[in-house]
Amino acid sequence: MNKQEISQKNLQEPLQDRYGRRFYYLRLSVTDVCNFRCDYCLPDGYRASGHQQPELSTAEAETVIRAFAQLGTRKVRLSGGEPSLRKDLPEMIRAASQTPGIERVAITSNGYKLPSVIDTWHQNGLDQLNISIDSLDTDEFARITGHDCLPKILTGIDRALELGVQVKTNAVLLSDGAQARLQQFLAWLKTTPVTLRFIELMQTGDNRDYFASNHLRGATIEQQLIDSGWQLLPRSIDAGPAREYVHPGYAGRIGLITPYSKDFCDSCNRLRISAQGKLHLCLFADAGLDLRETIRTGDVQAVAERVRALIGNKELSHYLQRGDTGGTQNLSIIGG
């Protein structure tokens, strides 16, 4: 067997790290820019860095997606920042949906433009939509995000459901008012067929004081759900990190993402590429591993081989429990 045959054989084997974890899920950030000012992420709004590299082009993003598809990726999530700020986002969706091996294309968005873009996204191959909604109270939503646009976002979600797009909503758990927000969400889920995912607030380089004042363990909410008859669902191999629950009395589901639980990283199945073409083996790694020059060549196999070579550097776990947030200053940098 010659070198090329050996290389091709390796690319056909699922991407696996030294701890036996296999990776079926790529989170591809398409921009760092965000137009929201969420308290826990960018309270002062987005500020551009003077020395930052340009964002990946559509062609470069397609090279990345095709390379990961060769490595066994089944699901691609386009994230940000706020991905809808990219005018070429529909072309990126189409490129991902038309890549052999990619079974599901998802977007995480704040929903600000949703009513005007969801039809186009769907036409280009969008399968799943994640929208950040931290509160169903319009005033509180505006206070958290800096934008009074909750009704518009909910209208966009209704349209996505009409189109058959699978919808999930993300809500960061915040200690103050958590029970009131939970009751609002439960009432909404009675008749709304979405999956609401409670995400435990994570400490980043920029939010240490906010984290200390607002962190709430997801286990607190999870036990309440279990006591109320919610049942845990089996997890698919390309699923995100949430543990999802169902209840016969509700049209919607509830998921919990609890990064401070001791076994959280055991089931890691996802890798991240930043908008500048850096591979992040963990959301809280010290730094990304630069793939930009290889990506620019358009050589899909070379990118795949580079990723396979670097996967050996992935750690067993993040170190959030000891307050080590790595190089993540805020979650818009790499899309959470």
Image: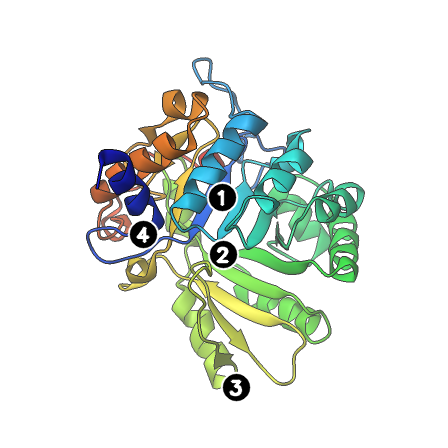
Front label number (3 vs 2): 3
Using the numbered discs, state the Cα–Cα distance from disc 3 to disc 1 in whole angstroms.
31 Å
Tell me residue 235's x, y (percent): 44, 70
Reading the image, the residue beneath label 3 is: 229
> Residue at 51% across / 61% down in the picture?
198
The amino acid on which the numbered mark 2 sits, given as a three-letter code, is Leu
Q: How many marks?
A: 4
Using the numbered discs, state the Cα–Cα distance from disc 2 to disc 4 in whole angstroms.
41 Å
Instruction: State which tag comes first along the sequence, 1 or 2.
Output: 1
Mark 3 residue element: loop
Using the numbered discs, state the Cα–Cα distance from disc 1 to disc 2 in whole angstroms.
9 Å
In the displayed structure image, the side of residue 57 where residue 52 appears, left or right: left
Give neighbour class at mark 1: few <14, some 14-19, many 20+ (Cα, 10 Å).
many
The amino acid on which the numbered mark 3 sits, given as a three-letter code, is Gly
Front label number (4 vs 3): 4
Q: Nearer the viewer, residue 144 or 71?
A: 71
State the mark number for residue 174: 2
Above or below residue 88? Residue 321 is below
Reading the image, the residue beneath label 4 is: 13
Instruction: State which tag comes first along the sequence, 2 or 4.
Output: 4
Work out whether residue 261 can be spotted: no
> Residue at 36% across / 37% down in the picture?
304
Marks 3 & 2, CB-CB < 8 Å contact: no
Q: Nearer the viewer, residue 103 or 217?
A: 103
Reading the image, the residue beneath label 1 is: 40
Work out whether residue 129 can be spotted: yes
Q: Quadrant of residue 45?
A: top right
